[in-house]
Structure formats: C-alpha cells, structure tokens
C-alpha cells in the first residue's frame, strides 16, 4: 500500500524546548566511574585520555555533539539512600558507603562539586534529585543552601571552604524519584508523599524562590499521578513521569514508545484538571525525566543494564523522540535514561568508546529537530501482526493503526528550514508521497541510518550502523529504506 506523509508547516504545535534532549547520570553500574570519569577515579587511568579535572575526553566530546541542556543527577533509585554530605570536601575524608539501591559500595569520590564541574566542562546545566527516601527536609535544605546560597551561612561557607566561592545556582530540583515503588529503599504512600511534597516545596521556596520543582509522578496513567497532582499542582513547576518500553521483538521496540504518547496526553489532562480545581492560570509542564527502550530481562546480572542496542532499538528511540516533538506543547523536559554505559547510547571501556545504534537518532534529533514543532499526518502502510508483551498489556493506550512510518517535523523560521524526521519500521522499503503545505525551494540533505534489525555497533565495528549523508532533491516522492531512520532537510 502506498504511504503519504502530510506536513502542515503553518500549524504550529509549539516551539520545541531543547530540554527534551536532556540526559541522566546515576551512580549506577559504570555510568559515573568508568563513564564520566575513569574507573580508577580519583586516580588517573593509564589508558583513558582525560581533562585536567580527570573527566574522560571521549565522553565529554560526545556530549558536546548533543548539547543536552540538562543532565539529571545523582539518580534514579540511588537518590533514595544517598547523603550529599558524603560526596563533598577533601578526598581523603570522603566516606565509602554501602549503597542499597544497586547493592554496591559507593566510594563518594565523585559528588556534587565534581558533577557540577563536569557539567560546566560539557556546557550543561545540572538538574538535581532530592532524597525523599532516607533523607529528610533538613538534609535537603542543607544541600540547596550549599549549592545555591551566597549568604554568610553554615552550608554556603562549607562550600566556600571546599574551594567554591560562587554558588552553583542549580535551578531544577526533583522532589524525590519513583518514591511510590516497592523497589525503593524507602517507599511512601501517595497521601504521605503529597503531604511531604507540599512541606518540602514550601520550605525550599523560602530558601530559594528561584528554583523550579518537579513533582514525582509515575507513568501518567496511575491513581498516583492523579492524586499527587490534585494535592500538589500549585506547588510545582513540572510533573515527572517515567516509562521504559520493551524490545523483546522488533515490533515491541518500534511500536511500544507510542504508549508514551497516550501517557503524555493523559498526564496533560490530569494536570489541567488539577489546575482547574485550584483555579490556577500558571501552566505546569511534563518532565519525562526517565525514558528509553529497556528490558532488564534481556541483560540480567551484574552487568545488566549495559544493554547493547540494535537497529530495532534505534528505531524505538527515534519514535520516542518523535513523541516528544509531537507533544512540544506540554513536554518541556525529557531525559534519556541513562547517558553513559547504563542503558545508554554511549558505551565505554578503559581507553575506548563506541556509539550505539541509539546514539544516532538522539544526536541527529538534538541537532536538527529544533525550532517549532508542526503538525504531521501519516497514512498508508501499517503493521497488522499480533500485539504481544507491552503492546498487549497496554492495548488501550495504542492507536488502532500502527503505521510503518512514524514522523515528526520542525521548522526553523530563522534559517527557513523544514526538517522531516521519519522512521520506517517495515522490513521492506516504503515509498511515500510528501504533502507539504508550502513550496520547497530546494532539498538540502538526506541523512539516513539503516540496517538489519539485529545489527549492533561494537568496539570492533564502531560504524556498522552509522549515518549516510546524501544530496536531497526537491522531489516529493521519497523511498524510505527498510528498518531506517531518515532526516530530510528542505529549504523553504
Ligand atoms: O534508570 C534506571 C532506573 O530505572 C532508575 O534508577 C530508576 O529511577 C528507574 O526505575
């Protein structure tokens, strides 16, 4: 069946906030030690090429290609049992601690100031998550004072005594992480959380009214989300949701991210209902601060979470990004979970790094899917197989028709460039007619990443799956290769 892609450049959804290309660094596995810094940290590595501060140059350079506006830190589940005080001050006095979320010993040689220094080197804004598990409000206020205050006060002076004169000025703070989950070191009920979140938000705003607070939501389709929003919506700036989509089969990998589309729409409705009840004009946006394609069963054990991503996963990540662009009016922050080694598009070992398949949609979307998000519509060729796994359990959240092509488009009005980003999940080429509501002056460039569903990159074959750039004509019939991610750039 022929396919058609309609793009209405005159219908703006909203400007794309580049914060949807944000990242996430957790003290988990080799994300920090072995990822941002050598595994030997604070001792230098013999093999890793590092900056004078001891940051891996290869990882830092890769981040600079994406330019994620924010990176969330230090977790994740890790948050619920960490004490920020263990990770500041002279190295010789740092205390290794038993870490319960991931059952490790955390050396604490990399903490608040090291992370902020890394962010400054990468030109990224740090985004912190408070411990609402074992941590109390006093500890949270102390951390915020340490980071943000320039008063002559104990924790601001403690920071100065650690050699940091100027406050870090951290704007974005999460009020806990997944505190509803029985996997948390300290789990709470929705009632207890909502009461606590209001108290914490009030006190935090007294300390620093400039902060932006993120409420801890679930998936956006739970009673938890509805309840905490009803109670707390007027105390926060964002509602956080998390979702990981399964990839046991090619179809799950590429279609399950569409569940997130519904979860965004439902979350928006819950936010608006809560705002209505409180007669609130101020908008509250979605912070999708953990998302990715991930199935822990596929990579179990201690090295679990070091998932090697194939082409199907790459297409899934591209669809995830399309979902955020299509909902640019409500999703203001999204953090790929995670940024290095742990379910990540970047994979390192001592002295080397490679970019996984999922790196390509992430970096290309961050570079080209910018400007204003515009309306798109796909018709034609669709997948009609049996829906299993997450596609079956979340049946009501998926569209009736799952088209083989998935698309998002943006217009950069300054440069007069239309970018059309297309996933072809079909195991065959698909020809499509492009219907654009204004004349195209010229094609600029086609960037295509394609492969077989199971293809992966590795240290031995770093470029097996990588982009191919070619000239693009103004022709409106385009063939999308089987299993491909394509960016088309047109001059308007
Ligand atoms: O990103 C891995 C883990 O997934 C995070 O620590 C947690 O928040 C989520 O369950």
Image: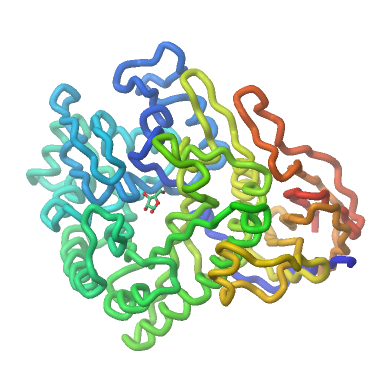
Classify residue 175 as left or right of residue 438. left
Asked if residue 143 shows in the view, the reply is yes
Please determine whether, in this image, residue 426 is positioned above or below residue 1: above
Residue at the image point whose x is 63% and y is 60% from the top: 322
Residue 73, located in which quarter of the rendered image?
Answer: top left
Question: Quarter holding the C terminus?
Answer: bottom right
Where's residue 23, x and y in %?
46, 46
Please determine whether, in this image, residue 396 is positioned above or below residue 405: below
Where's residue 82, x and y in %?
22, 44
Residue at the image point whose x is 23% and y is 61% from the top: 187
Residue 96, located in which quarter of the rendered image?
Answer: top left
Classify residue 114 as left or right of residue 461. left
Classify residue 205 as left or right of residue 347. left
Question: Quarter holding the N terminus?
Answer: bottom right
- Give whichever of 345, 374 is nearer the camera: 345
Residue at the image point whose x is 40% and y is 33% from the top: 30
């Amino acid at each position: 069946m022929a396919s058609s892609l309609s793009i209405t450049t005159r219908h703006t959804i909203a400007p794309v906030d580049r914060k949807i290309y944000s990242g996430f660094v957790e003290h988990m596995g080799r994300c920090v030690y072995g990822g941002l810094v050598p595994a030997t940290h604070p001792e230098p590595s013999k093999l890793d090429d590092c900056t004078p501060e001891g940051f891996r140059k290869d990882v830092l350079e890769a981040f600079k290609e994406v330019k994620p506006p924010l990176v969330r830190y230090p977790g994740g589940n890790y948050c619920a049992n960490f004490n920020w005080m263990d990770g500041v001050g002279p190295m010789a006095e740092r205390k290794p601690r038993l870490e319960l979320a991931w059952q490790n010993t955390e050396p604490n040689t990399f903490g608040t100031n090291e992370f902020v220094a890394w962010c400054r080197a990468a030109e990224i804004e740090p985004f912190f998550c408070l411990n609402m598990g074992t941590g109390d409000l006093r500890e949270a206020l102390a951390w915020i004072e340490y980071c943000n205050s320039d008063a002559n006060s104990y924790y601001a002076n403690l920071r100065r005594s650690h050699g940091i004169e100027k406050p870090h000025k951290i704007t974005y703070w999460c009020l806990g992480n997944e505190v509803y989950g029985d996997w948390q070191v300290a789990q709470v009920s929705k009632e207890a959380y909502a009461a606590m979140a209001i108290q914490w938000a009030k006190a935090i705003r007294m300390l620093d009214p400039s902060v932006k607070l993120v409420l801890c939501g679930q998936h956006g389709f739970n009673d938890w989300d509805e309840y905490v929003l009803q109670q707390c919506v007027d105390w926060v700036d964002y509602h956080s949701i998390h979702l990981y989509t399964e990839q046991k089969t090619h179809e799950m990998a590429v279609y399950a991210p569409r569940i997130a589309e519904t979860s965004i729409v439902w979350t928006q409705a819950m936010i608006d209902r809560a705002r209505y009840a409180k007669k609130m004009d101020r908008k509250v946006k979605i912070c999708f601060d953990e998302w990715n394609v991930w199935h822990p069963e596929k990579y179990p054990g201690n090295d679990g979470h070091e998932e090697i991503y194939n082409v199907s996963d790459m297409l899934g990540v591209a669809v995830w990004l399309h979902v955020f662009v299509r909902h640019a009016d409500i999703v203001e922050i999204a953090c790929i979970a995670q940024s290095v080694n742990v379910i990540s598009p970047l994979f390192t070992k001592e002295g080397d790094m490679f970019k996984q398949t999922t790196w390509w949609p992430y970096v290309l979307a961050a570079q080209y899917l910018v400007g204003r998000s515009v309306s798109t519509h796909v018709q034609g060729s669709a997948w009609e197989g049996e829906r299993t796994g997450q596609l079956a359990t979340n049946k009501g959240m998926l569209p009736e028709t799952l088209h083989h092509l998935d698309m998002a488009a943006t217009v950069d009005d300054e440069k007069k460039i239309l970018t059309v980003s297309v996933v072809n999940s079909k195991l065959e080429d698909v020809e499509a007619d492009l219907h654009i509501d204004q004349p195209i002056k010229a094609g600029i460039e086609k960037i295509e990443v394609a492969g077989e569903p199971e293809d992966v990159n590795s240290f031995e074959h770093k470029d097996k799956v990588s982009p191919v750039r070619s000239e693009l004509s103004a022709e409106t019939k385009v063939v999308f290769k089987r299993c491909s991610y394509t960016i088309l750039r047109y001059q308007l």
